Image: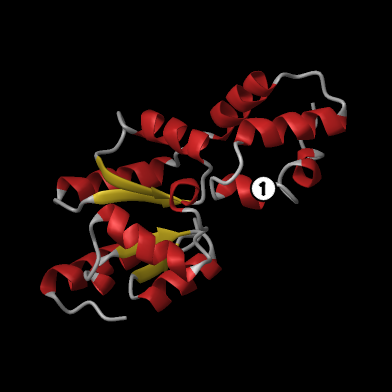
Amino acid sequence: MDARPLDQALFAAPWAEVVTGRRPVESALADALRELGWEMGVEAALDCWYEEDFVVPPAVLAAATAWAGQGVPLALVSNQEPRRARFLQQRLAPLLPLQGTAFSGDLGVVKSDPDFYDRADRRLGVAGLGPSVVFLDDTAASIETATGHGWTGILFASDTDWRSAVADALDAARSGSATD
């Protein structure tokens, strides 16, 4: 089945409410499936989507595991609706020692909104740590907003040396010389 029609039916209009926790994913997906005339049930669609989309790149897993082994607390900060957020927490728990999570569906705003980082600070217990918080993300707008908040933002792209950039930022944070 070609999932591309969901881009318009689910991810265009109702998704802003879903990803910020103002509308349950189940009702939005049910409406989208009905609109598309698909017979697949909501639970089957969610199970398929979550399982197929759960991919942890080995390089990211190895780097995060190494940083955790060095005593760096790890947190997952992501635009996720509440149900998928819980799925990710459960699936990542045996792989990574996460110290916390900050999801848009729990915070009520997405990562491109400056309020996200104030709320994430409180949720993660990192308020006042500013540039010592090293934030790796694959979206330039989120990096810009996080950096504007005072975190150290590093753009993740598989064709860049993001591991060295994170290592340098962690070294700067440890030495107390992290800068905006």
Name the residue located 80 percent from the left edge and 46 percent from the top edge.
Answer: 8
The quarter of the picture where residue 91 lies is top left
Name the residue located 48 percent from the left edge and 74 percent from the top edge.
Answer: 144
Q: Is residue 42 above or below residue 75?
A: above
Q: Tell me the quarter of the image containing the C terminus.
A: bottom left
Q: Position of residue 37 (x, y in %)?
A: 87, 26
- Label 1: few (<14), some (14–19) or many (≥20) C-alpha neighbours in 10 Å: many
User: The residue tagged with tag 1: helix, strand or loop?
Assistant: helix
Find disc 1 in the rendering and name its residue.
Answer: 15
In this view of the protein, which residue sits in the foreground, 127 or 163? 127
Q: Position of residue 40 (x, y in %)?
A: 75, 19
Q: Is residue 21 above or below residue 28?
A: below
The quarter of the picture where residue 57 lies is top left
- On the question of residue 31 being in view, the answer is yes
In this view of the protein, which residue sits in the foreground, 56 or 164? 56
Q: Amino acid at mark 1?
A: Trp
Name the residue located 21 percent from the left edge and 47 percent from the top edge.
Answer: 68
Q: Position of residue 5 (x, y in %)?
A: 82, 39
Residue 170 lies left or right of residue 12; in this view the side is left
Residue 40 lies left or right of residue 145; in this view the side is right
The quarter of the picture where residue 161 lies is bottom left
Name the residue located 78 percent from the left edge and 35 percent from the top edge.
Answer: 32
Q: Is residue 18 above or below residue 177?
A: above
Q: Position of residue 119 (x, y in %)?
A: 37, 60
- On the question of residue 55 being in view, the answer is no
Q: Tell me the quarter of the image containing the N terminus.
A: top right
